[in-house]
């Protein structure tokens, strides 16, 4: 295909998917680009909001989207429709294992969704896209990738809730915030002295706390509404 060839949106996405198989950078960029789509898909499939503080569903959705990149075949139809099927399948398996009676996935309905509709829905959330890109840039300053955040988020709900509570308190203390963004690290001892949170908890949830503090301090309202839902 020549450089002058004009690709449709669907064709461009297929190229991006195949590029993502060859390059970890391209894969990460594609996943980040479609986080709004993944979040919206989870919300439509489960009927639940996605919370960064209690977000097993988001982790599953991200892994499912990553899996879809590897398994997609153009003969399966539009990539986004296929990706949503994979997300639905993985979420269904997760909720079945956890005996969640509130979860209901209708595969037949999902299979009828048109790629164009999904793309349009995705673009409606351009503010979320922009904020995710800003969030990503801020995280990089702290030497944190999105994969780091997923891997190092607190595993237990109570710990995640506590980490969000800490993040809110930190974001409201200007002295701590100033030092944090000056040194690009979490000033654990200062937080311990001033806000009296446990050093052990601060150390254990460091990456997660930094990530959530950024959301509050940088006033990333779309991410906060869509993911934190506080």
Image (tube, grey):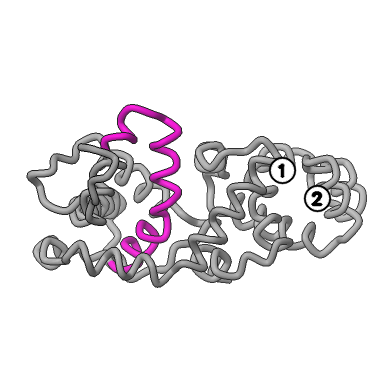
Mark 2, residue position: 197
**Disc marking residue 201:** 1
The magenta span reads: 18-44
Instruction: State which quadrant residue 100 falls in.
Output: bottom left
Asked if residue 112 lies in the magenta stretch, the reply is no
Find residue 168 and report its horizontal and vertical position in percent. 73, 62
Report how far apart the C-alphas of labels 1 and 2 lie in the structure. 7 Å
Q: What number is the disc on residue 115?
A: none
Question: Mark 2, residues whose alpha carbon is within 10 Å: few (<14), some, or many (≥20)?
Answer: some
* Residue displayed at 78% across by 40% down: 185
Dot 2: what SS?
A: loop
Label 1 neighbourhood size at 10 Å, few (<14), some (14-19), many (20+)?
A: some
Which secondary structure type mostly characterizes the magenta part of the structure? helix
Task: Please name the residue shown 68% across and 49% down the image.
Answer: 209
The answer to which of 50 and 96 lies nearer the viewer is: 50
Q: Are marks 1 and 2 in contact (CB under 8 Å)?
A: yes
């Amino acid at each position: 295909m020549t450089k002058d060839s004009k690709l449709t949106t669907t064709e461009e996405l297929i190229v991006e998917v195949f590029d993502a198989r060859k390059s970890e950078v391209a894969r990460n960029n594609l996943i980040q680009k479609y986080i709004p789509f993944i979040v919206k898909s989870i919300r439509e499939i489960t009927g639940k909001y996605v919370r960064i503080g209690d977000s097993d569903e988001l982790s599953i959705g991200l892994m499912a989207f990553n899996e879809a990149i590897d398994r997609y075949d153009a003969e399966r139809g539009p990539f986004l429709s296929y990706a949503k099927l994979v997300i639905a399948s993985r979420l269904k398996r997760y909720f079945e294992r956890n005996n969640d009676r509130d979860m209901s996935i209708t595969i037949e309905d999902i299979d009828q969704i048109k790629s164009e509709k999904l793309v349009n829905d995705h673009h409606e959330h351009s503010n979320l896209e922009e904020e995710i890109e800003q969030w990503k840039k801020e995280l990089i300053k702290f030497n944190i990738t999105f994969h780091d955040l997923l891997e190092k988020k607190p595993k237990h709900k109570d710990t995640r809730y506590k980490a969000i509570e800490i993040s809110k308190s930190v974001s409201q203390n200007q002295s701590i915030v100033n030092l944090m963004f000056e040194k690009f690290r979490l000033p654990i001892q200062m937080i311990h002295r001033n806000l009296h949170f446990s050093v052990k908890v601060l150390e254990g949830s460091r990456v997660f706390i930094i990530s959530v503090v950024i959301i509050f301090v940088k006033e990333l309202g779309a991410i906060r509404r869509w993911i934190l839902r506080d």
